Image (cartoon, grey):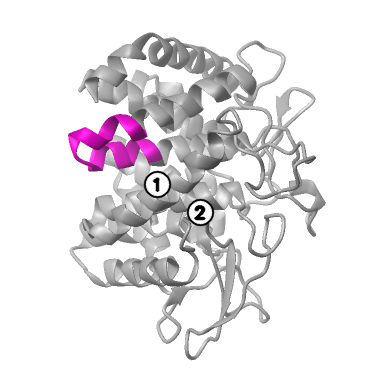
Amino acid sequence: MQAVLQANESFIQETWDKIESKVKVTSERIKDSMPYTSRNGQYDDWQDTMDWWTNTFWTGILWQMYGATKQESFKRYAQSMEAKMDEVLYGYDGLHHDVGFMWLLSSVMNYELTGDEKARKRAMLAANVLSARANISGGYIRAWNGEDNAGWAIIDCMMNIPLLFWASEQSKDARFTHIGTMHADKTINDFVRADGSVNHIVIFNEQTGEVVDIPRGQGYVSGSSWARGQSWAIYGFAQAYHWTQKPEYLHTAKRIAHYVLSCLALRGYVPPCDYRQPADSKLLDSSSGAITACGLIEIAKAVPEAEQALYLQSAIQILRALDETCAVWDDSDECILTNGTAAFHSGNFERAEVDNKSLIYGDYYYVEAISKLKQLLQA
């Protein structure tokens, strides 16, 4: 692993320096705002929709920066955003399956870096909310709210269940892990296909857990291969393995990764929106590449030495491709990555529809991936 890292040391360090320089400038303008995308070169602000699932990804970027630099302004803005999210946490009605994203990147990171007890309690409350969404008869954690989708589950939830594993470690209470592994096992059985591609949404019978339908979700069609769903699966199963050490989770992460890497090799390592979208589609999704890179790094840390280079070098190849094709390092735009696409088809929420623009979670995972590599270099 060290040989790969050392061969790419200049790229890792230079990219981190560019990230640090950019985030310092941007943070002094937007401070404790909650961006989703950039418009006319500036991050927007979703504080009028406090329960939007991406509202703490900027918080996560600030905590990544604070962990590396100990610059107090990063901590101050991140903690301010976390406190604002109490409106959602204690308001209850806006809570949904993405509480993992929302409080892992705010309260958990805060607690791990500062020991803030109030942050730990917020994260534990969020974990209890997530665990309460478990349908024990069906064997899954339900997605979204509403009367008509109680049987729905989505691949994204693999990235939320690490909050449950963390909560088990904190509380010494295995019930959180039981729910997390229940959902992960159901995901292997009913989301992951034999070739390593995955479904985005599966609708289950609430009583039996049998598959009722497989909608297209945010991909091209049902049965296609939504790139961000693939990346959630790679990183989600890698994290599930980290917390549980269950070999089947690592094997699943690798199987999905191998499918994705075979697709990326033909595309210059910048993902399309869907790996099975029509050949004439120009939609890319840089966020999928950044998330995939994070997952590959975690796989590299988990596999025997003889396998590590495959995953680590692939992660770096993706990050280099994103740097060359999608990154914005000057002041023309506050985002880090362009060429992000939220979904192949337009949906019901026009404000959230983004095609080939920036996505705050793409920026976050790019920062996280480079930070992971930097930490491995220094280990």
State which quadrant residue 251 falls in: bottom left
Main SS type for the magenta part? Answer: helix
Residue that appears at 58% across and 61% down: 200
Q: Is residue 55 magenta?
A: no
Q: Position of residue 245 (x, y in %)?
A: 21, 56
Image quadrant holding the N terminus, namely top left
Q: Position of residue 308 (x, y in %)?
A: 27, 33
Amino acid on which disc 2 is placed: Asp
Q: Position of residue 99 (x, y in %)?
A: 49, 58
Q: Position of residue 365 (x, y in %)?
A: 49, 35
Mark 2 lies on residue: 86
Q: Earlier in the sequence, mark 2 or mark 1?
A: 2
Residue that appears at 49% across and 50% down: 232
User: Is 290 above or below relative to 18?
Assistant: below
Query: In the rendered structure, which segment of residues is drawn in magenta?
Result: 296-311
**Foreground pick, 270 / 364:** 270
Mark 1 lies on residue: 107
**Which tag is nearer the camera, tag 2 or tag 1?**
1
Under circle 1, the secondary element is helix
Under circle 2, the secondary element is helix
User: Is 6 above or below relative to 226?
Assistant: above
Residue that appears at 64% across and 25% down: 335
